[in-house]
Amino acid sequence: MKKFLGLILLALSAQSFAQDIAIIPAPSSVVAAKGTFTLNPETNILVDFPDHKAVKLFTEFLKKNGYNNTIVNINATGTKPANVKNAIVLQTTFTGGAVNNENYELKVTENQVVVNGKDAGLFYGIQSLMQMMTPQKKGYATIPCATIKDAPRFAYRGMHLDVSRHFYSVDFIKKYLDVMAMYKLNTFHWHLTDDQGWRIEIKKYPKLTQIGSNRAQTKVGSYSGGTTDGLYDNTPYSGFYTQDQVKEIVAYAAERFINVIPEIEMPGHSVAAISAYPILSCDPSKSYKVAETWGVFTDVYCPTDTTFRILNNILDEVMEMFPSKYIHIGGDECPKDAWKKSGFCQQLIKDSALRDEAGLQSYFIRRIERHINAMGRRMIGWDEILEGGVAPNATIMSWRGENGGIAAAQLNHDVIMTPGSGGLYFDHAQSTNAQEPLSIGGDAPLSKTYNYEPVPSVLNADQAKHIIGVQANLWTEYIATPAKAEFHLLPRMLALSEIAWTPAANKNYKQFSEKRVPKHLAILESKGYNYRVPDIEGVSDTTLKGSDFKFEMNPGVEGAHVYYTIDGHTPRETDMWYTEPLRIKVPAGKKIDFQCITITPGGKRSNLVKMVLDNSGQ
Ligand code: ACM
């Protein structure tokens, strides 16, 4: 009996160690052990590569958080890490050999912490280590003992941002890259041009930013009807990045092992560029203005030699600024109206023996791909570039569901999965609740994002290898401020990171959302990020019939409280604070108006829940 009890206790305590380890994305393997390592002012940081970006990350983190530890170069000093008690050892001798050296090992014992990985591997090992640290008094932190072996599931782990519809500052982009790096995302897809604004300086074509980065005003509210139909804000809007700023961002990202892929949209979504240079259109005699509302526009690039010369020159400057192997050329949502009306286009279709305007789109993309390939780079396009015949070396981003991605993988093209239907359009609302802010579309709750599986089961093993990764997109038609961008990003980006990194077999939504996300949201809040406060677990807007009710509620953010009222008032910090399972008895013939809300220490609020507890007998 005693032995049996001991086993139960052991099992319970192993479980509680595991709960202390709240790493997102969940690693491939975590073996929790008893005990903790304590970082204290005497702890030395032993490194074999002092200039490594990961060492810089860790030393900056320590300094910023009030730790003042000595860094020791073990090669220069001849130090043998094994002989040093009380050390954090950062090593680059790891020979695990996964893709791009992104894998690492992290071992925590009571005497030492050892993180070992090359390149990005060491950086990611340190991200995991920082997530495991629980600060104590100044200069002290505890780290639970464990052995972690970790490697990414996908080589491409992307987060997109549209800066055309709304412009985001260099500082905001850096903050965005910081949070991507925390969660081991390695690709920033920067959507730099669209109908509503051209946002990157091109020295050869200055009007692209002089004219194309400015719109006279912006549509208010929903673009598709409603009470704000026809309403504009009468306020000029502008913004672009200089080439120096672009290079600064590319370098900042590279410090964090993030590759930046620029997107220069063509042949559609090009009204801003056409406004600056009407010669790019099929009717240069018309005058054009940068779009003031959202949607898809019929003024698109005309496939003339002049257009290709200009676009190739633009791409050459872009490739100078971005070392990325991949260059994104858009290719989505290109209406064919202008090409149908254009004598030039119709003649080109005949002369080039193209079937129709879809063939002309394919001709356009192939011609651009030849230029990109000639410069030693690879082209990415949205899945419309499959129409009329895919360009020979293109990588496809599957956004209109998975069919484009499946077709491309079957044609042996690489694919990045980013379907709106998979909860990867972060501009969509996070629930169907009317309290969600104005959003461009649908319902993409955290659970939907989390449960997305990027490899469609119809693919065979060889085809499945072409799914190189997964990405979420943040389109900003209705996202005009950093606070709203972060609200739409978080916590869904944490779910994206787990789809992209964690072996599918290790995923567990309940454990993720109930145990790990609440801790991370508290940390993100302390770092100054906005986020959507999760819905309160255990209650929902509904009417319940009966006389005797019991609720267990979970606030979803560590340190936050659920406040409630039973008198019809909107709950605030001054109302009752939920601390233990709540019993409410409703007298016969009465109804109780129960309302609750989560409020975080920083004052962020969840959606308000209203529940009627009805014992009226009707
Ligand atoms: C897209 O969402 N139009 C790629």
Image: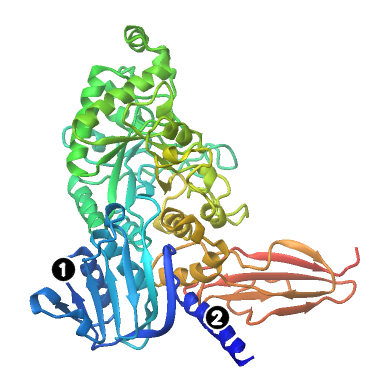
Query: Which quarter shows the C terminus?
Result: bottom right
Instruction: Give the residue type that dot 2 points to.
Output: Ala
Disc on res. 223: none
- Residue 305 in which image quadrant: top left
**Residue 295 appears in view:** no
- Residue 325 in which image quadrant: top left
Disc on res. 49: 1
CA distance for labels 1 and 2: 39 Å
Q: Residue drawn 32% across and 22% down?
A: 364
Instruction: Classify mark 1: residues with Cα within 10 Å, few (<14), some (14-19) or many (20+).
Output: some
Closest to the observer, 76 or 282: 76
In the displayed structure, 437 sits above or below 290; it is below
| Quadrant observed for ligand 1 in the rendered image | top left
For this orientation, the residue located farthest to the bottom is 2
Closest to the observer, 66 or 417: 417
Query: Residue at label 2?
Result: 11
- Residue 534 in which image quadrant: bottom right
| Residue 45 place in picture, x, y as percent | 21, 79
**Residue 482 appears in view:** yes
Q: Residue drawn 84% across and 74% down?
A: 547
Closest to the observer, 2 or 367: 2
Instruction: Give the residue type that dot 1 points to.
Output: Phe
- Quick one: label 1 or label 2, which is nearer the N terminus? 2
| Residue 251 place in picture, x, y as percent | 20, 54
In the displayed structure, 394 sits above or below 561; it is above
**Tag 2 secondary structure:** helix
The mark lying in front, picked from 1 and 2, is 2
Instruction: Tally the marks.
Output: 2
Q: Is mark 1 in CB contact (under 8 Å) with mark 2? A: no
